[in-house]
Image (tube, grey):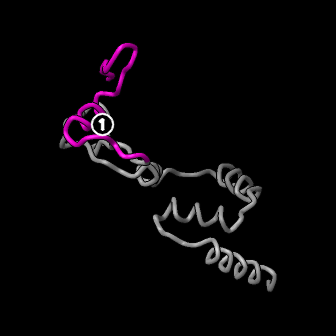
């Protein structure tokens, strides 16, 4: 359900409830309904979650067909992964701070292992 928050401006009800109780929602975070019922906007049912964690929690247990896995694999293989790119992904997905130099060493090690096979 949407709530009118200004002229030609609407906000989802659960966001209004959360902001009224806790203040602004930080960038990269979302409001999650604990019981997965998006109509239950009681404050005790709402929690702040990191966006990536929220998505992975909702996708956990979703079966992936072999065609879907092949499509994802092909798309990932086409990406050029520089150490900077890999460091950014690691930092974003795992919340770790790893330098591009560390990632470059790890990628070189993986490449050596592939070459040995």
- Relative to residue 28, is residue 73 depicted above or below? below
Quadrant of the image occupied by residue 15 = top left
- Give, as a single range, the part of the protein colored magenta: 1-27
Q: Position of residue 47 (x, y in %)?
A: 27, 47
Describe residue 84's horizontal placement relative to residue 98 as left or right. Answer: right
Describe residue 116's horizontal placement relative to residue 59 as left or right. Answer: right
Q: Position of residue 95 (x, y in %)?
A: 46, 64
Count of marks placed on residues: 1
Taking the spot 30% from the left edge, 21% from the top edge, the residue there is 3
**Per the image, is 24 magenta?**
yes
- Relative to residue 111, is residue 8 depicted above or below? above
Q: Is the C terminus in the top left, top right, bottom left or bottom right quadrant?
A: bottom right
Taking the spot 63% from the left edge, 65% from the top edge, the residue there is 86
The local secondary structure at tag 1 comes to: loop
Quadrant of the image occupied by residue 73 = bottom right
Local crowd size for mark 1, using a 10 Å CA cut-off: few (<14), some (14–19), many (≥20): few
Using the image as rendered, state which of residue 107 and residue 7 is in the foreground. 7
Quadrant of the image occupied by residue 17 = top left
Q: Position of residue 82 (x, y in %)?
A: 71, 65
Q: Is the N terminus in the top left, top right, bottom left or bottom right quadrant?
A: top left
Taking the spot 28% from the left edge, 33% from the top edge, the residue there is 14
Q: Which residue is mark 1?
A: 37
- Relative to residue 36, is residue 1 depicted above or below? above
**Per the image, is 32 magenta?**
no
Describe residue 110's horizontal placement relative to residue 40 as left or right. Answer: right
Q: Position of residue 97 (x, y in %)?
A: 50, 70
Using the image as rendered, state which of residue 66 and residue 30 is in the foreground. 30
Q: Hey, which residue is sitting farthest top in the picture?
A: 7
Taking the spot 42% from the left edge, 54% from the top edge, the residue there is 53
Using the image as rendered, state which of residue 52 and residue 16 is in the foreground. 16
Using the image as rendered, state which of residue 17 and residue 6 is in the foreground. 6
């Amino acid at each position: 359900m949407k709530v009118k928050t200004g002229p030609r401006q609407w906000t989802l009800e659960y966001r209004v409830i959360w902001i009224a109780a806790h203040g602004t929602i930080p960038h990269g975070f979302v409001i999650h309904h604990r019981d997965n019922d998006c109509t239950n906007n009681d404050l005790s049912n709402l929690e702040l979650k990191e966006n990536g964690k929220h998505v992975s929690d909702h996708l956990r247990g979703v079966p992936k067909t072999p065609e879907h896995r092949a499509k994802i694999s092909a798309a990932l293989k086409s990406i050029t992964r520089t150490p900077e790119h890999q460091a950014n992904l690691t930092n974003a997905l795992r919340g770790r701070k790893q330098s591009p130099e560390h990632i470059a060493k790890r990628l070189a090690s993986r490449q050596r292992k592939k070459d040995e096979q």
